[in-house]
Each structure stands twice: as structure tokens, then as C-alpha cells.
Amino acid sequence: MNLKLLNKIAKTIFITGGVIMIILGIKNTIRIERELAEETRFTIGYVIKWYQGAKGKPTVNYSYTIERKNYESSEYIKSGYKKSVGKRYFLKYYPLNPQNSKLLLDDPVPDWLKAPPNGWAEMPKLDMENKRILE
């Protein structure tokens, strides 16, 4: 085979692979959003890292625990959350697959609050002055 034909085949395979990866990523995002809309529980997530690639979106890595099992995930965020590392935020997750989660960076969690092992059915309302959950 001539070199031009091999080059053309390689480019086609590379482009097709990229398109497939994009489609699978979109499909996975849609599935996670659907699951979180279906059934959600809440717990506390800890931001462990903030980073931004050369041309990428700002991203946070976070960890959380459900039923004594630790999970880590990451998600793209708005650039204003750079100072979120080391802080705690409410997080919603899909109970049938807790790896599917979304960190709620607009909802910080005070240090005194501890999550139950399987989280909360609804995001708790807090009495900050008396350091307790409102019923």
C-alpha cells in the first residue's frame, strides 16, 4: 500500500475513535443526569483537588463515603470555586449506583455536621446558630 493511503486510513480511524469517545461521554452524562433526577440521596463531599488543564475547564476531585465505602469522583465547575479545596459540600448521589454523584458547590457544609452512613433522603435544613438539623 502506498503511504498516502495508509495515512488516510490512520486519520479516519483516529477521527472515528474520537467521535465515538465524545458520543459515549455524552451518553454517560445523560444517563447520570437521568438517574439523579429519578432518585437522589444526599451526603457530604470533600473537595480534594482543583485543577485546570492548559485549555480545559476547571475541575474538582472530591471524595465521599456511603455505607463505609469510599468513593472519588470529579466534575467540571465554574472557575470561581478555586478556593474550594479542603472544604465540605452537600452532594447528591444515586443510591443504586453511588458512583453517580454531583457535588453541590453552592451548598457548603459546616464542620459540625456528620452524615449518616447512607446519607439523607432530602438535603437537611440546618440551624447554624444552634448547630443542629431542623426537622
Image (spheres, rainbow, N blue to C red):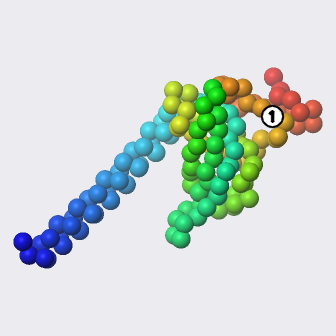
Whether residue 77 is visible:
no
Q: Residue at x 53, y 71 (%)?
A: 54
Q: Is residue 61 above or below residue 13?
A: above
- At label 1, counting other C-alpha atoms closer than 10 Å, the crowd grade (few under 14, some 14-19, many 20 or more) is some
Quadrant that contains the N terminus: bottom left
Horizontally, residue 128 falls left or right of residue 2, namely right
x, y percentage for residue 102?
A: 59, 42
Judged from this view, the residue extending furthest toward the left is 1
x, y percentage for residue 105?
A: 69, 48
Judged from this view, the residue extending furthest toward the top is 135
x, y percentage for residue 122?
A: 68, 28
Residue 41, located in which quarter of the rendered image? top right
Horizontally, residue 57 falls left or right of residue 9, namely right
Q: Is residue 118 above or below residue 25?
A: above
x, y percentage for residue 125?
A: 79, 32
Of the residues shown, which amino acid type is indicated by label 1? Leu
Quadrant that contains the C terminus: top right
Horizontally, residue 103 falls left or right of residue 26, namely right
Q: Residue at x 68, y 49 (%)?
A: 47
How many dots with numbers? 1
Q: Which residue is mark 1?
A: 113
Q: Residue at x 56, y 51 (%)?
A: 75
Whether residue 114 is visible:
yes
